Image: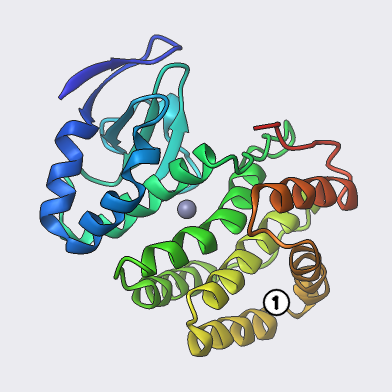
């Protein structure tokens, strides 16, 4: 482990990738295959460090989500996982987070944070990147359908006693999360559970259906499989919803 000093001078204990990668490889042959094909791209650029949500400084933990995530600092990329050292059940999430690093290094854009709603950028990012990452992981033998099924169950449980917000940007964030799960199901070829999810959402939140359908149609119309499509789509979303933001040029 090393003591990582962040650009804001926060410090934390972190695992290096030299420590984490062999551990993850030992836990899963799919991870080994993933690394042997994609590892070269991951070696480019800033070093990747690993920290757990328990020891992460507040400045880099997303307060509104317990999900693992990637943080870019000036001189490093930090992957925040729920617990470290990782166990077998954490391998999928670790590979998924590395997938976000891969996509960024392949030129996919990172949506800019909106001053009025810091979480929306994260939802847009997940909506557009998660399906691409999960389908890619399935090619290495990871069980994308099992991961998707558990993700749908968690989302349905979280939304069980919720009602849609009134705020325009919060509603858009809800739509991004729901559309993201719909797209993820299509890319992971989990048609049955994806259908159940859609029926459940449309049944529970009928007043949100036009907004969900509108966003879904825009995403499908422009597409999101390439960095160029994602850039165009983020610009389209910014224009349609008057976000007055465009994605950063990669
Ligand atoms: Zn993700």
- Viewer-proximal residue among 241 and 157: 241
Q: Is residue 150 above or below residue 70?
A: below
Q: Secondary structure at mark 1?
A: loop
The residue drawn where x is 47% and y is 40% is: 63
Q: Is residue 78 above or below residue 177?
A: above
Which image quarter is the N terminus in?
A: top left
**Which of the 4 image quarters holds residue 8?**
top left
Residue 103: x and y in percent read 51, 46
Ligand 1 lies under 8 Å from the Cβ of mark 1: no
Residue 133: x and y in percent read 47, 58
Residue linked to disc 1: 205
- Viewer-proximal residue among 34 and 215: 34
Colour logic? rainbow
Which residue is at the far top?
A: 9
Q: Is residue 197 above or below residue 230?
A: below
Q: Is residue 121 visible?
A: yes
């Amino acid at each position: 482990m090393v003591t990582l000093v962040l650009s804001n001078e926060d410090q934390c204990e972190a695992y290096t990738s030299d420590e984490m990668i062999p551990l993850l490889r030992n836990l899963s042959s799919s991870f080994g295959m993933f690394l042997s094909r994609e590892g070269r791209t991951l070696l480019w650029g800033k070093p990747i460090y690993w920290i757990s949500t328990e020891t992460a400084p507040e400045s880099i933990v997303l307060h509104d989500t317990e999900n693992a995530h990637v943080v870019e600092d000036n001189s490093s990329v930090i992957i925040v996982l729920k617990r470290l050292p990782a166990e077998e059940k954490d391998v999928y999430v670790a590979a998924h987070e590395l997938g976000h690093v891969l996509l960024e290094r392949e030129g996919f854009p990172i949506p800019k944070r909106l001053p009025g709603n810091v979480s929306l950028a994260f939802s847009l990012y997940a909506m557009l990147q998660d399906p691409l990452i999960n389908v890619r992981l399935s090619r290495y033998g990871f069980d994308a359908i099992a991961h998707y099924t558990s993700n749908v169950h968690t989302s349905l449980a979280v939304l069980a006693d919720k009602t849609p917000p009134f705020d325009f940007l919060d509603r858009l964030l809800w739509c991004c999360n729901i559309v993201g799960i719909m797209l993820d199901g299509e890319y992971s070829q989990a048609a049955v559970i994806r259908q159940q999810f859609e029926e459940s959402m449309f049944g529970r939140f009928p007043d949100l259906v036009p907004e969900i359908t509108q966003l879904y149609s825009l995403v499908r119309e422009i597409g999101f499989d390439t960095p160029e499509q994602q850039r165009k789509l983020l610009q389209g979303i910014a224009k349609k919803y008057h976000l007055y933001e465009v994605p950063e040029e990669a």
